[in-house]
Image (cartoon, rainbow, N blue to C red):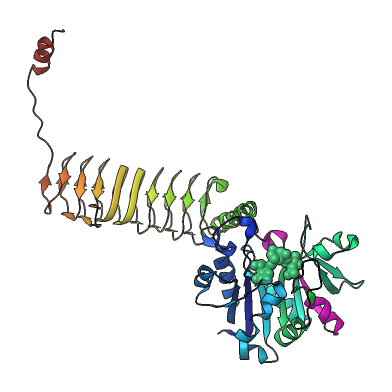
Amino acid sequence: MSNTSLAVVVLAAGLGTRMRSTRPKVLHEVAGRSMLAHVLANVAALDPAEVVVVVGPDMPQVAEAAAPHRTVVQQERLGTGHAVQSVQSALGGLIESPDAEVLVVCGDTPLMTAATLERLRAARRDRQAGLSVLGFQAAEPGGYGRLVTGNDGALLRIVEAKDASPEELALDTCNAGLICARADLLFELLARVDNANAKGEYYLTDVVGLAVAAGESCALALAEEDEVQGVNARAELAQAEAAMQSRLRARAMAAGATLIAPETVFFSHDTALAPDVIVEPHVVFGPGVQVGEGARIKGFSHLEGARVEAGASVGPYARLRPGAVIGEGAHIGNFVEVKNATLAAGAKANHLSYIGDSTVGEGANIGAGTITCNYDGFGKHRTEIGAGAFIGSNTALVAPVKVGARAVIGAGSTITAEVPDDALSVARGRQETRAGGAKRLRELRGNK
Ligand code: UD1
Ligand code: CA
């Protein structure tokens, strides 16, 4: 059941100038999905009644990535407070109820967890405060807003680094940029925020001081610094990626996979490894990979959009592309590429092959150097290989083509027509051997 009193506002109108990119900042990827998608996934875990993403003008890709959530265009980038204010009418009736709650998050903090968002909400609820703010101890407070507290530790206001006095700059409890508030209070305060500050912007952070002045209390929740890390430049994107990879490695191991050298294995946000999977060093998982119990992914393999079933073995140096399904106990060896193809249980392709747009039956053996010629320059065609078939080395299977169950194909064949079940087919130049022919050739050329 959805959380009927909760609306989430995701701030994503920033241009991300420092990324030096034609792509809006929040669409840059971490562990194979956009930062915005990470944030939206965490937000979804709270099951809010409404999520609205604030985007800048001319950002149709962000709106597309935000779907099915609504987006509101902030025509002029006048500050975080102005950005939140711009969703007020979009939230409509939802925020009129007295217990309505608004949670504001940033689109560029992909490491934030749903658990921390819940803690921010709980901090406000538990103290029956008007607002709650997420803070963290910054190793280098730099440009972050500083949390100014009173003698009793209660939050008094947030001062932006550019507006801070030297004493305030010395504070190291900083604002993570998220806020949770009673909806009526938030919009009432935002209407009073001005832009008389160093940046000439309407700061969301000013609502804290205004709330305190109005006699409302502000709760504080604390987060780990690595979770609140915002991404503003490519180097920070790489740091976020590194932090996310360590999390994913830890998650895979906690779920029962062995990573022989975890720091060399790269995951996608959705990689699913069953217990007792063994991943050797230097393996890259792109999006959409599932690996079944006890399977082994050997070194230097690259997998994306693929399913590897229990007990199968893949690599070393294998490439599984989208639509590859490697059946139970099947073997894919070195320098084998599989795309949009299913290998049934126990099938083997151990060396140097391309298997595309194909089905390979149970226990079939694909010899070294076999190529499915699936593309004729115009369209893709399918190859079907029956159960127990044996494809000799260096065979070209020109699709569309079918090789029957238990059929045997001689090495070096170019197969262009159907091979029935149990048939033997050889399709290559016939070998001609002339006894003594080499000797005669040498004599003709005058050398011994
Ligand atoms: C903000 C906080 C600061 C905090 C820091 C944490 C304010 C005034 N300051 O500063 O206290 O320490 O985050 O990272 O809130 N955005 C819009 N529209 C705007 C302006 C910003 O959508 O008009 C979005 C940005 O795309 C970004 C987020 O709001 O996702 C934060 O804006 P940014 O300019 O990065 O704020 P900071 O200066 O980092
Ligand atoms: Ca920022």
Left-right relation of 291 to 393: right
Q: Is residue 397 above or below residue 103?
A: above
Left-right relation of 318 to 242: left
Image quarter where the N terminus lies is: bottom right
Q: Is residue 43 above or below residue 448?
A: below
Image quarter where the C terminus lies is: top left
Residue appearing at x 67%, y 71% in the figure: 77
Is residue 116 visible to the viewer in this orientation of the structure? no
Left-right relation of 428 to 45: left
Residue appearing at x 72%, y 60% in the figure: 225
Residue 306: image location, x then y, percent = 39, 57
Q: Is residue 85 above or below residue 378?
A: below
- Quadrant location of ligand 2? bottom right
Examine the structure image and report whether residue 112 is included in the region drawn in magenta: no
Left-right relation of 213 to 310: right
Q: Is residue 63 above or below residue 25?
A: below
Examine the structure image and report whether residue 213 is included in the region drawn in magenta: yes
Q: Which of the two residues, 109 or 243, is positioned nearer the viewer here?
A: 109
The magenta segment: 207-232
- Count numbered badges in the picture: 0
Residue 118: image location, x then y, percent = 67, 74
Is residue 91 visible to the viewer in this orientation of the structure? yes
> Residue 177 sits in which quadrant?
bottom right
> Residue 75 sits in which quadrant?
bottom right
Residue 122: image location, x then y, percent = 72, 78
Q: Which of the two residues, 131 or 265, is positioned nearer the viewer here?
A: 131
Residue 150: image location, x then y, percent = 90, 72
Q: Which of the two residues, 45 or 75, is positioned nearer the viewer here?
A: 75
Residue appearing at x 41%, y 43% in the figure: 317
